[in-house]
Every structure is written in structure tokens, then in C-alpha cells.
Image (spheres, helix red, strand yellow):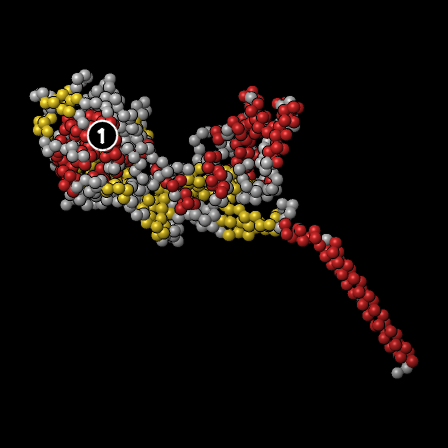
Amino acid sequence: MDDKQIRKKKKKKNHIPFRLNILFLLIFFAFSVLIMRLGYVQIVKGKEYTSDLNSMRKVETTVNSPRGLILDSEGKVLAGNKSSYAVVFTRKPNQDNTKLIDLAEKLSQYIDVSTKKDVENGIITTQDVTERDMKDYYITKHQETIYKDKLTKKEIEKADNADKAAKDKGKTANTAYDMVLDRITDKDLSTINEKEMKVIAIWRELVQAKNLTPTIIASHLSDKELARLGENLSKFNGMIDTSIASTRDYPEGHYFFLGNVKTIPAHQEDNYSAIGYNLNDLVGTSNLEEEYESVLRGIPTTYKFTKNSKGQVVGNPTEKEGQRGNDIELTVNGDLEKKAGDIIEKSIRFAKKPSFGNKELTSAYAVVMNPNTGAVLAMVGRTLDPNTGKFTDTSSATILNGFEIGSAAKPATLLTGYRNNAVPSSFVDKPITYKAGPPFKSYERLGTMTPETALQKSSNVYMAHVAGLIAGVHYQDLGSSYLATGSVGPRFVNAFKIMRDGYAICGLGVHTGIDLPFESTGYQGKIPTDFGIIHQFAIGQYDQYTPLQMAQYVSTIANGGYRIAPHLLDSVHAPGKDPTQLGPTVKTYKPKILNTIPNTKSQLDVVHKGMEMVTHTGGTASFLGSTNSGYVGPYPNVNYNKYKIAGKTGTAQIDQNDLQLYNETFIGYAPYDNPQIAVSVVVPKMRKSSINSTIAGDIIKYYFDHVVKETPK
């Protein structure tokens, strides 16, 4: 190796240590900076970062899942869900009214706002805007000047002091705002134009949304609305999005007992908020939708957000998917419900023929039950508009409206009389007279009556005698009539209570216990000052009862004395994998016996026999036991006999100035030797015809021919 090569090799070796030294120096500086930064983080900023970490908190919000289905007894969907395009709003923290109004103004450029009153749930309409909404909007739009315009300096100072005092007590107040609200005039509100009304309608939906909660503020968007909004979503900074919403659908018609699904009523907001609902959530607000809200609602989808000390969202939310609500199957038979409505409509048209003179007649009602279980099979009402000739569904009157039911109350009178040793084995039917006033009598002199024939022939005098004996009324036989004497003393008052209590344990004048959030108990008159009024009470011409109460009452008689709560729910089912089939059964309704009537079997058998005799030869509805009914109703020449109907007719005079105007009623069950169906019917404002009985007969006929498809043996 020559000298040149040796020098070159040495030079190369000298460069390696130098480079290593540079590398070590850089590593030293890097570690020094890192150590200094760690020291700064731990020593200088440690407390601040620890505080920030501790202030991180989880925020949880929910979004409702689709509601469960409501099906009839045959599995037909009565209340389902349908999909529509929707607007979804996610409210950011610290969005005040001003910002939300700005958002509503922007949103109003892309979605439509209705001006109609009756719209589907989810459609925004100006008809929902309240005066308070308008005042809040007006104040917000004029907030820079409104307080000076409406309040004096002293009033503002006084309001500030009131707010501070409230704060010291741990309360919140906005006294000045409340004062301004009271001073907004109609003239002020008249400056709000139609365009602004649409903005207010949107804004009132936005303000109800909770922070960070995806909230549907409008649904049923048209394709054009969806396109307009979709093209401009970027203008809303992530606060507005589109989605698919599930809304209620009633494919068989909106039966009243199903109820409604709407936004949470104002008076219930606190209750629902306390159990995790959002104020914009749709909830059941009446009847079955309300009664079984917890069942139908299902499990909401849950979103969890992380927020820092400044209230800012950190990262993306975690999602826990919810589940559709449980389905409920009802006792109601949809086909029977519809057919009963058709029967009522045809019966009213039949009775409106000029030959009957029923010009005041416009409506009729019927309730159908299983007397052994309380299962409600149908609740139907129809009202005819004389001007248009069209019918409207007024089925809610079956649980809300009370009627004097006339002689349909007589079985209850007889049962009450038995319990008070006031039922004679026989009694001659002839007019009862008083020292003053008109006589009390049956529609004709009926001769000697037994308890059974008193029901069969509908003897007013016999039933009046029963009630009178309880009340201490004395009857002097004058030969052609009785002279009744009595007084309104303690015994009379107690007798009136005994009669009412006797009716109540059968189901009249009390809550039936039906699984709905509200029902009427009818109407109770005052304790009368005339002792003769107890005679009117005994024949159903004093207090008023609902058709549902009548159905429970006749069911109590039919089943041997058990007052069973009517019910619409049959069973609850978890969502099934096959949308056409019910899922696994979660719960099955068990009949509830509310009380039993303390009558003996032999006493009940007398009533059963009397009601059977009503529908046979000599009875007030004898055609219901005939093989050929003739032309008493809209369906001529019907063989009702094979259905073995027992019943009781009723005719209650309802106008003291027109004694030929009646409520015609009927209670009945079939077959009389093994009751499977019970029916009550009310036909108000009748003069002539027997459609009260034929409506019941035709409903019973349809039930056996088309529902159970078996004729009683």
C-alpha cells in the first residue's frame, strides 16, 4: 500500500467520529427539549391540563325508535308506521333565540310551511303558532329597543333587583321579559306578516330541541323540498340534515280508540322530560296510543358525546342502536267494527223514511263485548249530517256521552229489589196516581205481572212498585188505580242511594275500568224533592249512562253476576323477524273481575228468563225470536230465532214538552243458554221504529255468521 492510499484511509476514519459526535449532539438537544417540554407540561401547565381532563364529561341523548304496531284480533294492522322524508336538527350549545330565528329564516327558503289546521303529524303549519310564540318572536326581533320602548328606567331597575333577589334564593327569574310580554299589543303583533308566521312556525319547533340531540322538526317532505334542501345542506354548518322519519299510519281508518300520536302536550312536558323524553318527541296523547305509550314506544337509540370545559364536543359520538316498540294485538275485530257501522247507517236511513216521522233522528251507537272475558269486540257510533246526507264516525260517544236508557234499566231494578226484599211474586199493573200531577203508568194496562212478565211486557208500574217499596212509598188500591203517598225523608234519600249503588255494581253510572285513559261515568241528577221521581229512576228516566256502561251491565247479567272490566288489549308481542307475523308473546291480558253482584242464582235466573221472554211471543222485541222478522229493519225477513237472543228494550222520554220523542235502547246477549256475545244499542231522538232492536240483532247475526262462523246450538 503506497503513502497516498494510507493518507486517504486515515482521512476517512477521521470523518466517522465527527459525524457520530454531531449525531450525539442532536440527540442530546432533542432529549433536552423533550425534557423541558415535559417539565413545562407537568410543572407549569399540569394543574390546567388536569382540570381540563377532569372537566371532560359525557353527554347522553336519545332518538326515538319506530313505534310498535297495533293490530286487530285477526292480525290486521290498524296502526302502523310509514316512512317519509324529514328534516333533522341538531342543536349546538349556546344557540339562543336570535340564532334560532336566523336559522328558521334560512330554513324557510327550502321547506314548505302549511297554513291549514288539519294536517298530518310532522307537517309544520302556521295554525300551531300561539300568541305566546308571536310575542316571543316579536321581542327577539326588537330586542335592542323593546325594553326601552315598553319599560321605564325605574321598572327596569326594579326588575333587575327582583331577578337578583330570586337568584339569591337559588331561583331564576326574568322579570323584565315577563313585563314586556304583558305589554305586547295586538297592534304590535299585527305587524307580523305571513312570511314571518311561517318562520315562527319553524322556529317554535327548533326551540324545543335539546342540545346535541338529533331532532326531527318536520316530516312528509316532498321530493322537491328534499332536493332543494339537499342541495343547500352545506349552508347550515352541520345543524340541519335530512333523514327518513317513521310516522303513524292507519290503513283501515283512524278508529277513535286507537288515539293520536303528537308532540308532548305542554302540561305534560315536565313528566316526560323526567323519564328521558325530548320535547320534540312524538307520544301517544289519547286512548290506546297514550294508555300503552311505554309498550309502543320501544327502546330509543342512544348517542353519547364527550364535551370539554368550554362545552365543545370532542370527537365523534358513540351510538347504541335502539329497538322498535312492542306490538299490541287487540280484542277488536276490524271487520265487525266496520259491519256494525254499516248496520247503523242503513238502520238510520231506514228509520228516516217519512212514514216513521223521525225527523230529529241523526245518530246511533253500539258496543259489542264478550260477556265472559270483558273483551271489547266493537265500539261504533255514526251521526248523519242532514244537510249533506253523509255520515261521520262518532264512535267516541260510546265512552263519552251519557243517555237516559229507559226500560233497559229494569233488570237492574229487579236485581236491586231482590237484594232489598222488595220484589213481589205478582202485582197488578194499573196506573199510579199522586195527590198532584199526572199519573204514572205503563204503555197499557198489563194485568197481573210476575217478575218475568214484568220484564217481558216492560211494566213500568211493577218496577215503580219495587223502587217505591224500598223508599217507603205507600200504595192505596183504589180499584182502577193506586194512590201513592210518601215523603222525601232519610228513608227516601237512602233508597235513592240503594238504587244507584244497585245499578253501579252492575256497571251503570261508574267507571267501567276499560284500558283507556279516560271515560265518562254519565250523569247523575240531584236527589229529587218529589218522592215520585224514584218511579222514573226505576225505569231508566233520570240518570244517564254510556253505551259502554250498558254493555258491561248486560255482560254482568249474562255471565252470572261478575262485573268484568272491559278491555281492548289482548296481548303484547316483541317485534318479529317476519313483518307479516306477530313476534313472541310478551304479555297476555288477564280478565279483571271488579265485583260480583250479591244475588242468588235463582234470582238471576228469573232475570235471564224474563229477558229471554222479551225476544219471544208477547215480548217487546218478539221478532228477535222469530224465524221471519218481517220488515222491522233495513234487512227484511231475517231468521233471528236461531241465534237465541235474550234482551231488554228501552224507551226513554227525553223532552217534557214532546212526550213522543224518545231514546230507544237495547241490551242483549246470545245465545241465552251459553252467552258468547253481549250488545248495547242507543238510538237517540226517535219517534217510531224498532231499529234499536234490529241493530243489535243484525250485529249478533253477523258475529255468528262471519266472525265465529258457527250458529248457536
Q: From what the image shows, is residue 129 above or below residue 593? A: above
Q: Nearer the viewer, residue 327 or 532?
A: 532
Q: Residue at x 45, y 49 (%)?
A: 299
In percent of width and height, residue 147 lies at: 63, 26
Q: From what the image shows, is residue 617 above or below residue 561? A: above
- The quadrant the N terminus occupies is bottom right
Instruction: From the image, tell me which residue sits under label 1.
Output: 495
Badge 1 marks a residue whose secondary structure is helix
> Does residue 38 appear in this view?
yes
In percent of width and height, residue 365 lies at: 27, 32
> Does residue 689 appear in this view?
no
Classify residue 72 as left or right of residue 702. Answer: right
- The quadrant the C terminus occupies is top left
In percent of width and height, residue 466 lies at: 16, 30
Question: Label 1 is placed on what type of residue?
Answer: Ala
Q: Residue furthest bottom?
A: 1
